[in-house]
Structure formats: structure tokens, C-alpha cells
């Protein structure tokens, strides 16, 4: 390791997944500083009339699309067979882009993936000081470096699926943008073994990747990701253009669990059979519309409350007015600095999340569930199934220079056995019996898997864009190769 770059950094305080969300942490909503009122005025300055018109168009689209989503339920989620990966992605590309989520069936061998859970449970038994949430009956386990987790992340099938998802569904409008969609990087995340009857890990609708940062100039504004929405042209917003995402800073407030790498898709691979109402994932499958609505909602308020005019009239466009000039507030509904963006009941009424959050279809061990980094998602409030709902969290990450900088710190954490640097700190697995070593990884896993961990030089592929090749070159320099 002496030839590779190192960057010892201050690790985050100890904690668990509840620290990532204000609701799980029991944090009461507080008024945001006045700088956010000024920011909102600046974001739409000169485009006020266009924003109002676009809001009205958006409400009309949502009203129609919400009904379709509610009627379809889980069947609206596209499904891809790994055995037909390229063909299915080509055929379903537009639908996956619209829905912002998909299931890729059979990415990992079923028997092998089912065995992962038993191996992890044995690892925890040998190391009873392993942490999790909730503390009295852990369902989300604070493990990052168990053997099954590393095997799943670096499996050739997983890396093939990730590359296909990035190159087929995403694109760069600027070919010189320094990002490689052909070169996946590994992001170490936790795992979940949720037992039947659990109602504590009840994470409601939310977006990851920051909250207030989506409006801030030095957050997503650095890449002009949502400019089309703020100038009144939400239909022109392209959720799958990666060019602007390279410059984004999604964590301006050092939040626990805030992601430092660009995750094109969040994801998990199932270790057990699970289905709707069995402790699984729900998503809002209207990616562009829900993102635009979340961004525009803080600029509008209702004239009359629902209790006075009733549900139908409350949602009518004529009941909502633009908060211009002196009427502008600092409100960013559901956004708390240092935490994920949440969608508490009643704050985003036109999304009708009570009927548009749909379950993922039934999955079996080895299936890979993915959802776009802007997708609103949640977990079942209660696990009503009869067996555990167990997953390994594995996102899909391209290569950028900034992500490589994180990989350097993550590589240190792997070698030390401490939590991945985005997550709550502490000794983690540094004293765990049976934790995989660098020597074991190098002797066991594929060359591409080792590269994705930052343990070897990344290889630039033929056919990558000029920006992609530059990203790999810069990443190797950061990694010390």
C-alpha cells in the first residue's frame, strides 16, 4: 500500500442510520435561516411568470399520472432479466427513465446470495459488539466489510449490471465532462435484516443526496442540475444527464450518512424472498414530475386549507398562489440541513404519496433493485410478512475525480476496519474476528472488483468519451497510481 495515496481525515462521530433523517432522530422541524428566503428569490428572478405557468402544467400532469400509478401498483416497476441484460435494457430504457426504478432479476446466483445472510449472522454472533438500529433489536446492521458484502459488490455480474445501467440509461450532454460511465467504483454501505413484525425501521418517503443542497448555489447549483425547473421549464429537465452532476456538492453540512460519491442509482440486492407489505421498499415512480414538484413546492402556498374547501378544491391550481416578493418565506418543506430530504404527510399534497408510493414487486435472493438518486422512496411502516426481509445496500457509482477522493478515504477505512467515511464513526469492525484482509481480497476477487475498491489502477476502456478517459486518468492520480 506504500505506493498508493493516503489521506487521513477526521472521521464522523458515532451513530446509526437514524442520524441521517430528522424524523428517525426525533428532531423537530425548525424555521430555516433568512438566507434561504433570499436564495429562493434569486432562483426564480426574471422567470416568475414562467414558473407559475409551469406549476399549473405540472399539477395537471400529476393529477392524471397519479391515477395511473395508483391503479397499476407494483406492476408499474420495469423488470429486467440479467440473462437478457442488454436486450431488456434497450427495450425498457424509456420506461425505466420515466419510472426511475427497476428490478434486475438474477444478477447474483440465488443459492449463493441466500447463504450470504447466514454468513453475516454468524459474523455478528462471533462479534456481539456489532452495532445496529434500533439498538434493542437491530434491523439495519452497521457492517461495511463482511466477506459477503465485499463478494456481492465485487461480483463480476454485479459490476456488469452496474456498467450496463450507467451506459444505457445515463448520458453526458457534454462529452468532455470528466465522468466515466464505463468504470464503476465501489461504495461501501450497510445491510438490513428486518424481522417480521418490526415497526421501528419505519422510514417514510424521502430523497437521499442532501436536502437544502438541492436549492443551494454551492450544492446542486454548482452543476446547474435543476436550472430548467427554476426557469419554468420542468419538462426540459433531464434526470439522466450526468454532465452537471459532476460538480454537485450534496453534503454542505457534514450530515451522518450523507453521500460524498455520485450514486447514479441507489440499490440493494435481496438476500431473502420478500414482497409488498413484507418490510420492503416503496418508490414514487414519477421521477421527473416528483422531482420538479419537490423543487417548486416551496414557492407556492394554498389560499384556503383542506379543512375548509375539501380535498379536491384544496389541490386545484386556483387554490395555490406564488409567494413572490415580500410574501416569500425561507420554507423548504421537509428539508433539514445535515439530513435527507423528507416528505412528511401533508407538506407535498399534489404528489398524493398515500396512493402513489408503490411497492417493489416480489423479489428473491440475487435480484438487484435500483432507483434513481432523485427518486422518492420509503420502507414499509411495518413488516407484515412471515420471514425476514434482508438486503445488501449496493449503489451504482461512476468514476469521477471527486469520487476517487472519497475512495481513498474509504480504502483507509477498509484497511482499518472502521465504518465507511460517509457513515457514523467509531471502531466499527476494526476488532471483529473474521474480517477480510487486503491479502484475502487480492487473492480472491476479480481484477475489476479490486480496481473498483481503489486497490489497483483503473483501466480506461476503448470507446469511452474524452471526458471519461480524463476522469479515469485523474482518478488514478488521486488513488496514487
Image (spheres, helix red, strand yellow):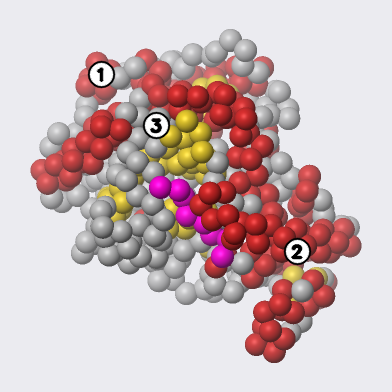
Q: Secondary structure at mark 3?
A: loop
Q: Position of residue 305 (x, y in %)?
A: 69, 84
Q: Secondary structure at mark 2?
A: helix
Q: CA distance from mark 3 to mark 1?
A: 22 Å
Residue plotted at (29% across, 64% down): 198
Q: In this rendering, does residue 419 appear at all?
A: no
Q: Residues within 10 Å of mark 2 (few under 14, many from 20)?
A: some
Q: Residues within 10 Å of mark 1 (few under 14, many from 20)?
A: few
**Does residue 41 sit above or below 86 in this rendering?**
below
Q: Position of residue 285 (x, y in %)?
A: 59, 51
Q: Is residue 431 left or right of residue 369?
A: left
Query: Which quadrant of the view contains residue 406?
Result: top left
Query: Which quadrant of the view contains residue 376?
Result: bottom right
Q: Earlier in the sequence, mark 2 or mark 1?
A: 2
Residue plotted at (66% across, 29% down): 171
Range covered by the magenta-colored residues:
355-362
Image quarter in which the N terminus is found: top left
**Does residue 459 sit above or below 343 in this rendering?**
above
Q: Are the residues tagged 2 and 1 within 8 Å (C-beta)?
A: no
Any mark on residue 106, and which?
Answer: 3
Q: Earlier in the sequence, mark 2 or mark 3?
A: 2
Any mark on residue 444, and which?
Answer: 1
Residue plotted at (58% across, 10% down): 462
Q: Is residue 137 left or right of residue 105?
A: left
Q: CA distance from mark 2 to mark 1?
A: 53 Å
Q: Position of residue 10 (x, y in %)?
A: 37, 44
Labels in figure, total: 3
The residue that disc 2 covers is 59
Residue plotted at (78% across, 48% down): 235
The residue mark sitting in front, 3 or 1, is 3
Residue at the outermost left position: 126
Image quarter in which the C terminus is found: top left
Amino acid at each position: 500500500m506504500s505506493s498508493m495515496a493516503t489521506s487521513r481525515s477526521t472521521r464522523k462521530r458515532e451513530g446509526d442510520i437514524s442520524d441521517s433523517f430528522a424524523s428517525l432522530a426525533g428532531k423537530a422541524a425548525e424555521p430555516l435561516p433568512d438566507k434561504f428566503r433570499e436564495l429562493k428569490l434569486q432562483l426564480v428572478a426574471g422567470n416568475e411568470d414562467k414558473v407559475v405557468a409551469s406549476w399549473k402544467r405540472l399539477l395537471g400532469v400529476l393529477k392524471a399520472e397519479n391515477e395511473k400509478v395508483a391503479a397499476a401498483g407494483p406492476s408499474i416497476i420495469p423488470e429486467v432479466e440479467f440473462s437478457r441484460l442488454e436486450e431488456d435494457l434497450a427495450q425498457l430504457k424509456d420506461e425505466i427513465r420515466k419510472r426511475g426504478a427497476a428490478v434486475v432479476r438474477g444478477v447474483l446466483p440465488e443459492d449463493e446470495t441466500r447463504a450470504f445472510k447466514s454468513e453475516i449472522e454468524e459474523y455478528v454472533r462471533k462479534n456481539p459488539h456489532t452495532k445496529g438500529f434500533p439498538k434493542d433489536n437491530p434491523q439495519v446492521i452497521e457492517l461495511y466489510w463482511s466477506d459477503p458484502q465485499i463478494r456481492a459488490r465485487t461480483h463480476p455480474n454485479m459490476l456488469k449490471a452496474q456498467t450496463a445501467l450507467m451506459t444505457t440509461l445515463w448520458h453526458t450532454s457534454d462529452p468532455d465532462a470528466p465522468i466515466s460511465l464505463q468504470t464503476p467504483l465501489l461504495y461501501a454501505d450497510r445491510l438490513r435484516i428486518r424481522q417480521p413484525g418490526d415497526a421501528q425501521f419505519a422510514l417514510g418517503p424521502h430523497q437521499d443526496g442532501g436536502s437544502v443542497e438541492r436549492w443551494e448555489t454551492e450544492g446542486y447549483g454548482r452543476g446547474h442540475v435543476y436550472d430548467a425547473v427554476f426557469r419554468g421549464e420542468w419538462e426540459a429537465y433531464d434526470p439522466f444527464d450526468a454532465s452537471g452532476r459532476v460538480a454537485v456538492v450534496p453534503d454542505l453540512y457534514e450530515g451522518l450518512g450523507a453521500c460524498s460519491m455520485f450514486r447514479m442509482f441507489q440499490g440493494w440486492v435481496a438476500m431473502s424472498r420478500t414482497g409488498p407489505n413484507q418490510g420492503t421498499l416503496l418508490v414514487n415512480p414519477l421521477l421527473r414530475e416528483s422531482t420538479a414538484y419537490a423543487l417548486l413546492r416551496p414557492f407556492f402556498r394554498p389560499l384556503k386549507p383542506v379543512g375548509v374547501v375539501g380535498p379536491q378544491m384544496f389541490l386545484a391550481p386556483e387554490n395555490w398562489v406564488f409567494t413572490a416578493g415580500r410574501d416569500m418565506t425561507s420554507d423548504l418543506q421537509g428539508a433539514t440541513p445535515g439530513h435527507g430530504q423528507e416528505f412528511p404527510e401533508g407538506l407535498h399534497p399534489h404528489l398524493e404519496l398515500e396512493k402513489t408510493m408503490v411497492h417493489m414487486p416480489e423479489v428473491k435472493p440475487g435480484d438487484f433493485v435500483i432507483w434513481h438518486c432523485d427518486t422518492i422512496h420509503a420502507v414499509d411502516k411495518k413488516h407484515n410478512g412471515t420471514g425476514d426481509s434482508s438486503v445488501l445496500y449496493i449503489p451504482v457509482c461512476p468514476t469521477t475525480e471527486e469520487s476517487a477522493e472519497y475512495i481513498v478515504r474509504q480504502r483507509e477505512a477498509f484497511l482499518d476496519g472502521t465504518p465507511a467515511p460517509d457513515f457514523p464513526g467509531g471502531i466499527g469492525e476494526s476488532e471483529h474476528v473474521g474480517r477480510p484482509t487486503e491479502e484475502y481480497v487480492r487473492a480472491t476477487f476479480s481484477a475489476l472488483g479490486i480496481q473498483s475498491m481503489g486497490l489497483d489502477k483503473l483501466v480506461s476502456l476503448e470507446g469511452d468519451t474524452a471526458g471519461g478517459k480524463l476522469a479515469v486518468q485523474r482518478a488514478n492520480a488521486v488513488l496514487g497510481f
